[in-house]
Amino acid sequence: MLLYEIVERSAQRFPQKPALIFRDQAIPYAQLWGLVQACARGLRDELGIQAGDRVGLMLPNLPQFVIAYHALGHLGAIAVPVNPLLKAPEIAYIWRDAGIKAAITFPMVLETVLTARPEIPSLQAVLLVGAQGELPEGVQPFDAVLRPSGDPLPRAPVSEHDPVVFIYTSGTTGFPKGVMLSSDNILFDIEACQQMLELEPDERFLAVLPLFHSFGQTVCMNFPLWLGATTILLERFMPQSTMEAIEKHRVTLFPAVPAMYAAILQAAGEREYDLSSLKYCVSGGAPMPEPVQRAFEAKYGCAILEGDGPTECSPVTSVNPPPHKGKRKVGSVGIPLPGVEIKIFDENDRELPPGEIGEIVVRGRNVMLGYYNNPEATAEAMRNGWFHTGDMGKFDEEGYLYIVDRKKDMIIVGGINVYPSEVENVLLQHPAVLDCAVIGKPDPERGEVPVAVIVPKPDAEPDPREILRFLRERLANFKVPREVIFRQELPRSGTGKVLKRLLKKELEMDSS
C-alpha cells in the first residue's frame, strides 16, 4: 500500500464522515479525496510534477498541508516540509539540498521564501495558499492550480519502499540532514501504534502539533487518516483555544509535547473546561516532568502515555501501554512497539543487560531509508544494521525503556530540538566572535533555553543585543539564545573539545 491510498480507502469506507475539521468547517473524506486528486492533477499538468520530484511545503496546520502532502504522494513525488519559523538561509540550505522543483507556502512567510529563492536553483514555481490581490512574478494561487475534473489519475508509479517524504533534522554537525521515509516506513509505524493503542474509527484527534514535524505527521495526520478517524486542525498552540477545541469537538486523543501540558496547567482560565471526552493523551518530543504528568492526570482524569522515537524511525519506537493493556511507568518511555527491536549497546556495539546505561539502537521496518545525499552520515548512523539514536538509556527488568541522557549537546526548547553546533556555526560568522559554545539552561516554561558563551576577538567589545539581533536575522527565534555571556576562554579537553558540562557547572555557580 502507498501512503496516499489511506485517504482513498477511508473515502470509500466513510465518504460523508469528517476527515478534517478546520475553523469549525468539516471536510468529509469523499471531499478530501477529491481535493487530493484535484491537487495532483494540477501539480502534474500545470507544474510538470512527476514521480521522484521534490516539492517544498512551508505551511502551518492547514487543510492544504494535508491535501498537498498526499497529492504529491499520488504522483510519486516527495514532500519536503519545513518549519514556517525558519529564516531564509535555513530554508535555502534545506530546499537546495533536496533540489525542490516547486514550493507551496502561505502569505505570512512568502517574503522569506522569495528571499531564499535565488539560492535554490532547482525551484521553478511557488504556489500560495490564501492568495489575494496581485502576486509577485513566479507566484501562483494554490487554488488556481486545482483541477477538480479530468481523467482518473493512475496509481503512483512507485513502490512502497520509495521515499514519500524528506524530513530535515539537524545533526551534531549543525547542518540539517534529510531523513528519507517511505510509505512502508510510516504505515508500519502506524500499524504498530495501533496494535498498542487499539483505537477506533470514531476517534477524534487534535492536531496542534506542527504537521511539518514527524510526530505531527504520523500521529496527528496519517494515523487518523489510516484509521478513518476525524482530525481537528489547530494552526497554533494556545492553552485556552486548545482546551476549547477539546471540549467543543469532543476530542478523544490529544498528542502533545510536555511543554503544552505544562502550559495548559498554568493557564488561568475564566472557567473550567470539560475535557472528559479524552481517552488518551500522548506525550513525546521531550522528557515529561513527573510533577506535570501527575498534576495533569489528577486535574483532567486522563492518562498520559509517554513515548519516544526519533524522526529517523517514522518516529515512534516505544510507548507506555494504555491502562487496559498493561503497566504504565511514569518516567519511562514505555516498551518497544510490536515489530520494533530496541537494544542498549556499549561503545563497541555490544548489547548491555538490563540496568546498564548505553546507547539506544533501533531496528525495524520503521527505520528510515537513509539520509538524502549523505551516504557517510547514513553509514555512521546505521552501523551493523542498527540505527544509532545517539540517546543514552537503559531497560529495567520488565523491559521498560528509560532515557537517562539526550544526545550529548542537544537542547530541547518546548519540545523542539535545537542543536548547539548549528547556532555556533552562525555565531562564528560574527566579526567580533573568536570562540563560542551554546549550552542549555533549565527554564520553567520551555524546559530549556539556549545560552551563548562567547570569547570575543582581541580589542572587540561586542554588544550582546547586537549579537542577538545578528542571530535573529539568520536563525528561527526558538534557536536564538536567551542570554549572552562573555568569557576570556572556554574549558577544553586535551583533544580540544569544549567541555560543556564544566561550562554548565560554572553557570550554575555564577547564578547561585
Image (cartoon, grey):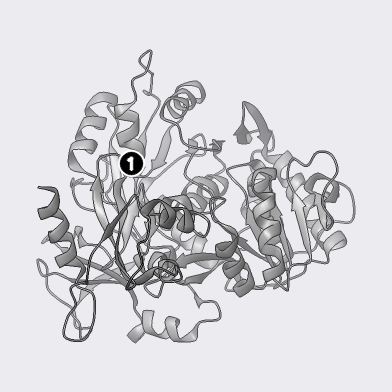
Identify the residue at horizontal 40%, vertical 75% (top origin). 173
Corner quadrant of residue 507: bottom left
Residue 141 seen in this snapshot:
yes
Residue 100 seen in this snapshot:
no
Residue situated in front as seen by the camera: 299 or 176? 176
> Crowding near pointer 1: few (<14 within 10 Å), some, many (20+)?
many
- Residue picked out by circle 1: 259
- Toward the front, the furthest residue is 459
Identify the residue at horizontal 14%, vertical 48% (top origin). 511
Corner quadrant of residue 254: top left
- Toward the top, the furthest residue is 271
The amino acid type of the residue labelled 1 equals Ala
Residue situated in front as seen by the camera: 422 or 258? 422
Residue 213 % position (x, y): 49, 54
Corner quadrant of residue 263: top left
Q: Is residue 299 above or below residue 139?
A: above
Residue 24 % position (x, y): 62, 26
Q: Count how many numbered circles sit on residues in the image.
A: 1
Residue 403 % position (x, y): 21, 60
Quadrant that contains the N terminus: bottom right
User: In this rendering, would 191 be left or right of 500?
Assistant: right
Residue 351 % position (x, y): 18, 79
Tag 1, which secondary structure?
Answer: helix
Residue situated in front as seen by the camera: 108 or 318? 108
User: In this rendering, would 115 be left or right of 343?
Assistant: right
Identify the residue at horizontal 64%, vertical 33% (top origin). 17
Residue situated in front as seen by the camera: 17 or 435? 435
User: In this rendering, would 485 be left or right of 150?
Assistant: left
